[in-house]
Image (spheres, helix red, strand yellow):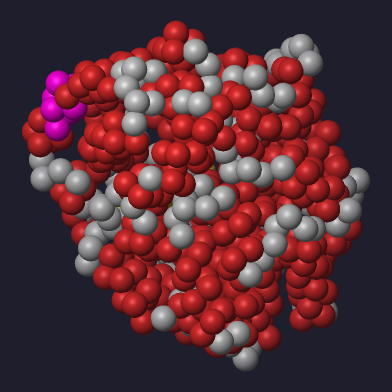
Amino acid sequence: MKPPTIFHKDETENTAAARTVPTRAEMPAADTWDLTALYPEVAAWQADLETVRADFPRMLEFKGKLGESAASLLAALEWEKGLGLRIERLYSYASLQTSEDGSNADFLSREAQLENLLTRIGEATAFFDPEIQAIPDAVFAGFLADPALAPWKTRLEKTRRFKPHILSEAEERLLALGAAALAGHRETFGQLSNVDMRFGTVRDEHGREVELTQSSYSSFLHKRDPAVRKAAFHQFYREFSDHKFTLAAALASSVKGDVFRARARHYPSALEKALFADRIPASIYDRLIASVHANLAPLRRYYDLRRRVLKLETIHQYDTYVPMVGNVETHTSFDEAITLVVDALHPLGKDYVSILEEGLRRGRWCDRYETKGKRSGAFSSGSYGNPPFILMNYKADVFTDVYTLAHEAGHSMHTWHSQRSQTYQDYDYPIFLAEVASTFNEELLTHHLLEKTTDPQMRAYLINRQIDDLRGTLYRQTMFAEFEKIIHAMEEAGEPLTLESFKAAYHGLLEAYFGPDFTLDPELDLECLRIPHFYNAFYVYKYATGISAAVALAQKVLRGGPADLEAYLGFLRSGGSEYPLETLQKAGVDLSTPAPVDAALGLFSKRVDELETLLA
């Protein structure tokens, strides 16, 4: 995206030698993903690209004919499907390679080739949606009733729902032509933060010079020595400060692009445009923020507990990740992490865990460790009929990374199940649902570890970990979601988007969420410039709603019977065949009410109480 007996002391030598990030060529093949499942060699990818380049103009043969009959519409949809399958595979291969090394000229060239081609395809197929929307209602209803179009009914109904926001063919062509240019800020941010930025080295608790990177930064924040954490924090943000005006310009461009697209398509706001596809009312977004604001007291109480337990005069943001239970050292190899995750997921059945274990151990689904130029963070990425690949930057001394593996495994198994149960046109589940499957796995992992330990210290460690998970996913992501809402509203109101206005908006949220007894370093205002998800606006709230739904569903599976398990597996198999709120209601949780979010916030408060008792 974990039994206590595998936790070991870090036995690495205390040397002064500098540690550097290895290159891709230095990594054993077994520790990298196997993209030959997509294409056996680059030549095959290039050949497929040329085939698509030669074939896509045939789509114009359907122009003006989509509304003639159900048969003509079906023919166009099936042809588009064949093209889409190829494009998805091409894109998966190119983007995964670029994620391996964002400085590799060949990788960047292939991705650029494909992006240019996709712009041309978007231009040529701009007629498609407007023609579907132009079909008279009575005729369209007749098409939907035709058995031949039954496999496409969901896709067509979802497409038709966008009718008020589909423009003329000429306007759609212009938007397609400008798509790549409007997304340029995302590439600028990625190249700057993943490739160009250099953070230097930091001396760790053993006196060793260790390279500071986007990935290793989290390792430093887990160190017991507060001086190490402080040094890493200030050095890390020094590099962001050196590029702060460029980063602010990129973020402003991203927001402006979101607002432009919303206005061009006649949405009331960028937020409502982002929610429209999932049929999520804005009230759910607003109620999430309101619920979190009403429950900030337990969060501030937790920060004060953390300050007292760590014996700090003042608490800073860089003090909020180190485990509060100091005598539990963790050093978990990647293979040990697989064992922990697989054991924790046994409530999901033999088939689920055996498929996942095969993919992680022998199927080379996962690219495991940090290398030069590799994209930071973690993700799962799948294309229809192909393995659901996982990118990690795994650190054995960061126990959070075990949870990250469980999280990404949840995404990958969601993809695996939906591919095998849905047609191509219905398999792609929305992000709103994806973040349920991923955080569900984290909940099972926490339950598994708590069940296996009788040691109060270990229990305190695990509860601390669950608190931090809820803090990071429910509180922190909601703060991010509120920031996104604020800065898009600023652009929509004609207010300036500058470095200072971003910092001011973000600082106000930091004060609200962390409270008056928390020390806010001035550098923390720059955090808003380094969050990759801000370049995919109104995404992060789905983490918060996702963990709320996951907590409820995990309890159902753990405490219930076969029917509850089958309901959850049915959720994984459903893909994108229904709208997300309805899909979750069938699984057993109703996010149209405040109950799931309030229950997750209640669990956070309960765990803080328990941790305070354990550490008394």
Residue 446 versus residue 167: which sits nearer the camera? 167
| Spot occupied by residue 370 in the image (x, y as percentages of width and height) | 36, 48
- The answer to whether any part of residue 343 appears in the image is no
294 inside magenta stretch: no
- The secondary structure that dominates the magenta segment is helix
Residue farthest bottom in this picture: 454
Which quadrant of the structure image shows residue 110?
Answer: top left
Q: Is residue 558 left or right of residue 148?
A: right
- The answer to whether any part of residue 563 appears in the image is yes
Q: Is residue 376 above or below residue 486?
A: below
Residue 526 versus residue 491: which sits nearer the camera? 491
- At x 28%, y 22%, the residue is 62
- At x 52%, y 53%, the residue is 578
| Spot occupied by residue 191 in the image (x, y as percentages of width and height) | 42, 26
| Spot occupied by residue 512 in the image (x, y as percentages of width and height) | 86, 42
- Range covered by the magenta-colored residues: 48-54
| Spot occupied by residue 453 in the image (x, y as percentages of width and height) | 58, 87
Residue 485 versus residue 319: which sits nearer the camera? 485
Q: Is residue 27 left or right of residue 549?
A: left
Q: Is residue 359 above or below residue 197?
A: below
Q: Is residue 577 left or right of residue 326?
A: left
